[in-house]
Amino acid sequence: MTQLHHALLFLASLLLFCPPTWQQFHHPQRISPIDLAALRDIKNSLTDLSSHAGTNFFSTWDFSAPDPCSYFAGVTCSVEPRSVSGQRVTTLTLGTGLSDSPGLSGSLSPSISNLTELTQLILFSGIVTGPIPSQLGSLKNLRVISLTKNRLTGAIPETLLTLPNLHTLDLSCNQLAGPVADLSGLTQLRVLVLASNRLYGDLPELPAQLLHLDLKNNALSGTLPNRMPLTLRYLSASMNSMWGPLNGLESLSELVYLDLSMNRFSGTIPPSLFRPSLSSMLLQRNNLSGGVPPSLLPNPSSPPSISVSSYGSGSIVDLSHNFLTGDISSVLAGVETLFLNNNRLVGPVPEEYVNSVYSGSTKTLYLQHNYITRFPLEPGSVLPESASVCLAYNCMVPRVGLTACPASVGGQLSRPLHQCSVFNNGSSIVVQCSGAHGPTR
């Protein structure tokens, strides 16, 4: 006991006069030497363009720091117990993403592929140039690749299109060129954004479980695939050179946003697309023909097949600048922003549209450049100030308040009489109106 007592006293004196340092109790987490070397290469290949003092993204990347996983901006490491080799980088975010930051310049180092535990790779907007390293295809744990709003060039590496766990691939707003290779190998992909590049060729086969597809502003051609992913909720391929019918969209019952504007699509619009759950349908500036399906009369024993009052706030349908014919259907009454202008629609405007404008449900209704004969507005009625209704250049003289039109419409309020007498679209349709000098009959 005496020896034990002396030993305890000796230890106590050591603690009193030689207290342990913080470092003796706290062992900083070591990062893997391989990952540390990769981060050094990544920093050397990029430059922060910000000229404001203290806003340099790499200012925290001090390679003498004891714990890079805690200090380096944009770096997140694994939370598992430290292994012999050290902690591994799991998330790499390059750039601040601040609106007033010019971002990074330089190029992406192939050394990123040495971060073999990486699950997310994000590059914020800047002027990073050069190709996307094909070596990224070796990062089998990657779930998110987002390299947007830079100046990346070359083709999309085919190695990326076989990553087994990839959930989101966003390469938008770059200068990538070439065809899009087969995407069917991305079995976990849910979000694909390739907008605003220089991609061309046909649209390849798409992953079966895709939810979000954005291909706008490229040079893609060909037709829509016969089999589109039934899970799609967002589809945009506007500002391309695609053509053919829209039949491939008939079975996409989950769609809530559709934008195929400014292409060369032709044929009729599938009736299944006229439903309130598809609250954004943008098909303007194509070669679409046929008519809008008629409103279905409600069955006394069951709800109507199509509700004309449930489109709701924020809904938008743009079918302008096509070759649509026939009477105006009431199916789209209730749409908040509706463009049917620059078609070949005939006859009077259904009262449902007038009521929708009166109630404030419809705020924008563009019907100019058609062959419309009447807008059933009661004498003395005044539309809400928030409503924009344009009926210029039809087979009628629009009343005051129905000419809230864009400047592109021109100054002619109605069509010449000879254009309204007979409009031929496969069969003769007689439309009578008085031109610009009297009431519509």
Image: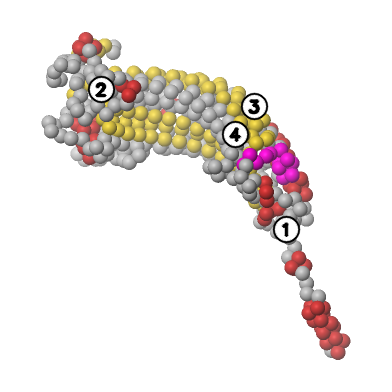
Q: Is residue 383 above or below residue 83?
A: above
Q: Earlier in the sequence, mark 4 or mark 2?
A: 4
Whether tag 4 and tag 2 are in contact, CB under 8 A, the answer is no
Q: Indicate the secondary structure of the residue bearing disc 2.
A: loop
Q: Indicate the secondary structure of the residue bearing disc 4.
A: loop
What's the distance in space between the residues labelled 4 and 3, CA to CA?
A: 13 Å
Where are the magenta residues, as a range? 38-50
- As for residue 116 lying within the magenta part, the answer is no
Is residue 26 visible to the viewer in this orientation of the structure?
yes
| Residue found at x 39% / y 29% | 282
The residue labelled by disc 3 is: 154
Residue closest to the far top: 418
What's the distance in space between the residues labelled 4 and 1, CA to CA?
A: 34 Å
Whether tag 3 and tag 2 are in contact, CB under 8 A, the answer is no
| Residue found at x 46% / y 32% | 235
Whether tag 2 and tag 1 are in contact, CB under 8 A, the answer is no
Q: Indicate the secondary structure of the residue bearing disc 1.
A: loop
The residue labelled by disc 1 is: 29
Q: In the rendered view of the protein, which quadrant contains the C terminus?
A: top left
Nearer-the-camera pick, 391 or 401: 401
For residue 392, the mark is 2
The residue labelled by disc 4 is: 150
Q: Position of residue 201 (x, y in %)?
A: 56, 21
| Residue found at x 31% / y 31% | 338
Q: Earlier in the sequence, mark 3 or mark 1?
A: 1
Nearer-the-camera pick, 62 or 309: 62
